């Protein structure tokens, strides 16, 4: 992501899939919305939420944090040795927009990271937004499964162990989809 100020948010194509920089923005804004936080804690949160599947470089995280401060999405209180970041009103709006970005390939490791990050901070938006975001995630996973079902399940190139792994991978996607549907049901029930 390049430097964003409040006026440039409207020009972002919010239909493009999330990328690595977006994941950092989502994690930083989400963590800062819960409490003021330092860089190291944001990096640890990304590692924990992604279950170790994705770990951006510290430099990339720092660059994104600097960009968020310059754009007015985070405020930085200088402390020693690292600054502490807090979310601003503009940052809360951006957090909501980050949650609305679509995921690309939610079955892949990076897609799983995006899914986990979204779920980690979904409670920070109102119920109607939560429902909408969950419905979008559900339809994305359904499309992923449909695309995989259309692929040749008995492809000779996979070999017998490759086919077993493919089936194992599909089982994970089906479980993820069932869990998202269950969460959507909780929201519909008001729990």
Image (spheres, rainbow, N blue to C red):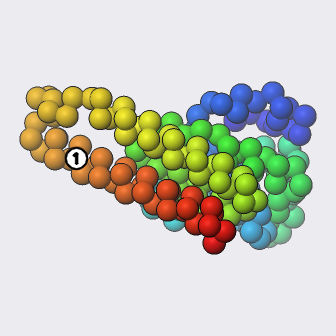
* Quadrant into which the C terminus falls: bottom right
153 up-or-down from 107: above or below: above
Is residue 147 visible in the rendered image? The answer is: yes
The front one of 72 and 104 is 104
Q: Residue at x 29, y 48 (%)?
A: 169
Q: Residue at x 24, y 51 (%)?
A: 168
> Quick check: 141 left or right of 12?
left
Is residue 59 visible in the rendered image? The answer is: no
Q: Quadrant of residue 128?
A: bottom right
* Whole-percent x, y for residue 109 in the image: 42, 47
Q: Residue at x 62, y 61 (%)?
A: 188
- Outermost front residue: 189
* Whole-percent x, y for residue 154 in the image: 14, 33
* Quadrant into which the N terminus falls: top right
111 up-or-down from 13: above or below: below
The front one of 5 and 41 is 5
Q: Badge 1: few (under 14), some or many (20 or more) residues near its Cα, within 10 Å?
A: few
179 up-or-down from 96: above or below: below
The front one of 7 and 105 is 105
> Quick check: 156 left or right of 29?
left
Kind of element beneath mark 1: helix
> Quick check: 60 left or right of 104?
right
* Whole-percent x, y for residue 7 in the image: 90, 34
* Whole-percent x, y for residue 155 in the image: 15, 29
The residue wearing badge 1 is 167
Q: Residue at x 36, y 51 (%)?
A: 174
Q: Quadrant of residue 187?
A: bottom right
> Quick check: 173 left or right of 116?
left
Q: Quadrant of residue 35?
A: bottom right
């Amino acid at each position: 992501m390049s430097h964003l100020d409040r006026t440039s948010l409207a020009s972002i194509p919010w239909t493009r899939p999330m990328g690595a920089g977006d994941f950092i923005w989502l994690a930083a804004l989400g963590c800062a919305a819960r409490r003021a936080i330092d860089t190291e804690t944001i990096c640890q949160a990304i590692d924990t939420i992604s279950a170790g599947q994705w770990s951006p470089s510290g430099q990339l995280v720092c660059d994104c944090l600097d960009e968020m401060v310059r754009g007015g999405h985070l405020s930085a209180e200088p402390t020693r040795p690292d600054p502490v970041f807090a979310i601003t009103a503009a940052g809360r709006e951006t957090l909501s927009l980050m949650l609305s970005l679509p995921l690309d390939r939610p079955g892949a490791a990076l897609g799983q990271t995006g899914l986990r990050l979204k779920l980690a901070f979904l409670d920070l938006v109102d119920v109607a937004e939560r429902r909408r975001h969950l419905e979008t995630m559900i339809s994305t996973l359904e499309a992923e499964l449909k695309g995989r079902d259309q692929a040749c399940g008995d492809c000779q190139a996979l070999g017998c162990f490759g086919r077993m792994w493919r089936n194992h991978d599909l089982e994970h996607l089906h479980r993820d989809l069932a869990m998202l549907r269950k969460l959507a049901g909780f929201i519909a029930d008001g729990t």
